[in-house]
Image (spheres, rainbow, N blue to C red):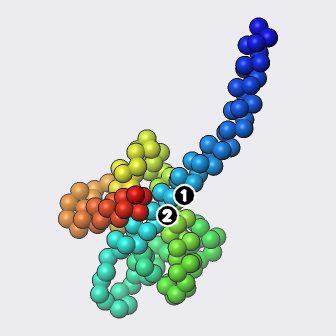
Amino acid sequence: MLEKMRLLLGGMIVSLILSPLVAQAQKQGFDSQVAAMVEALRLAAPKTGTANDGLYSQWQVKPETLKAWSRYCLKKEVTPTQFENDPQLARQVVSCITRRELKNQLAVTGNNEIPAVRRVACWWMTGNYTGCNSGFTATYVQKVVGYYQKQRS
């Protein structure tokens, strides 16, 4: 009986020691997924070839979208000009939104990474998580997935 108690106590101590380490490793893994997704979205952003096309930063974000995202992430609105002219600010906002969306879609897909990435890419382009199975949106989603996989390898 005493031996079982020692084993149980020892297991609990090991568990307490390892839990934060496992959690940290999972966080770092998720952080690298977010970074890969942010970069994939940047690389896949449509190149309109038109100056003043109404889209801002390397991620090609609409002004009305930027307002909501900056309020959510920074607790203040950012102007399109600020977003366009400050790459660090743009990356901060995009990373924040991408983190939120990727976390949600990983939960929806049972931590199935590529379907989650597909859903986030579709949402990024259309505002919907599904429906990007043909045409321009399907091509865009496939680009994002390809860039994402390159970033992760």
So how many labels did they put on this image? 2
Q: Residues within 10 Å of mark 2 (few under 14, many from 20)?
A: many
Give left or right: position of 78 versus 39.
Answer: right
SS state under label 1:
helix
> Can the viewer see residue 127?
no
Task: Give the residue at the far bottom of this rendering.
Answer: 51
Q: In the displayed structure, does residue 5 sit left or right of residue 102?
A: right
CA neighbours of label 1 inside 10 A, class few (<14), some (14 to 19), many (20+): some
Q: In the picture shown, does residue 106 fall above or below 2?
A: below
Q: Quick check: marks 1 and 2 in contact, CB under 8 Å?
A: yes
Residue 95 percent location from the top left of the image? 52, 66
The outermost residue toward the front is 3
| 140 or 22, nearer to the observer | 22
Q: Residue at x 74, y 25 (%)?
A: 10
Residue on which disc 2 sits: 35
Report the residue marked by disc 1: 31
Q: Is residue 72 above or below residue 10?
A: below
Q: CA distance from mark 1 to mark 2?
A: 6 Å
Q: Amino acid at mark 1?
A: Asp
Q: Nearer the viewer, residue 42 or 11?
A: 11
Residue at 67% x, 38% y: name it.
18
Q: Picture coordinates of residue 91 (x, y %)?
A: 52, 73
- The amino acid type of the residue labelled 2 equals Ala
Examine the rendering and report whether any part of residue 43 can be seen. yes
- Identified at 62% across, 43% down, the residue is 22
Which residue is the extreme one toward the top? 1
Residue 119 percent coordinates (x, y): 37, 55
Judging from the image, what secondary structure is the residue with disc 2 in? helix
Relative image position of residue 87 (x, y in whole percent):
52, 81
Who is closer to the viewer here, 25 or 51? 25
